[in-house]
Amino acid sequence: QLQASGGGLVHAGGSLRLSCAVSGIAFDDYSIGWFRLAPGKGREGVSCISMNSITYYADSVKGRFTISRENAKNTVFLEMNSLKPEDTAVYHCSSSTLPCSTDYSGSYVYTLAFYDHRGQGTQVTVSS
């Protein structure tokens, strides 16, 4: 199971720290990806951290978001700074036995078929 938490309402320029608590799988053997869903938009990959802690980001969040994992606590964190109204969405975390997928430039791309577990999301709302 994966459970995302830490969302909330912030003003533009503010920060939030999301957590993804993982249970029931061998956490060390999984990459963990974050994606978000916003009204009227499709699923968008945000960030991913591989089994060996290599990190990847979508172009839209590079330089603002930081992903990390704490294997002792089976938890992945997503530190979000300089938030923008366009970051408003429900954020989900998901697990995969495959490495994080990227496009030709190395930016993270969420590929639904690669992920075998996904938890309930957490709402992030950024006001202008």
Image (tube, helix red, strand yellow):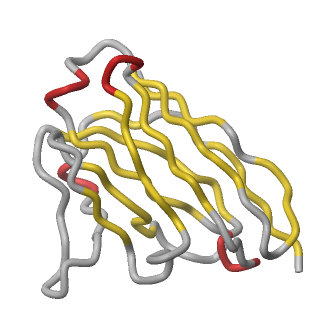
Taking the spot 48% from the left edge, 76% from the top edge, the residue there is: 63
Which residue of the protein is positioned furthest toward the top in this rendering?
Answer: 24
Q: Is residue 66 left or right of residue 47?
A: right
Taking the spot 19% from the left edge, 57% from the top edge, the residue there is: 100
Residue 87 place in picture, x, y as percent: 65, 71
Foreground: 115 or 79? 79
Determine the image quadrant of residue 39.
bottom right
Q: Is residue 127 left or right of residue 78?
A: right
Q: Is residue 93 left or right of residue 114?
A: right
Foreground: 52 or 60? 52
Residue 70 place in picture, x, y as percent: 38, 30
Count of marks overlaid on the render: 0
Foreground: 26 or 13? 13
Q: Is residue 57 left or right of residue 60?
A: left
Taking the spot 49% from the left edge, 72% from the top edge, the residue there is: 42
Determine the image quadrant of residue 80.
bottom right
Instruction: Tell me if residue 126 comes above or below residue 74 in the rendering.
Output: below
For the C terminus, the image quarter is bottom right
For the N terminus, the image quarter is top left
Residue 127 place in picture, x, y as percent: 88, 72
Residue 86 place in picture, x, y as percent: 68, 79
Taking the spot 13% from the left edge, 38% from the top edge, the residue there is: 97
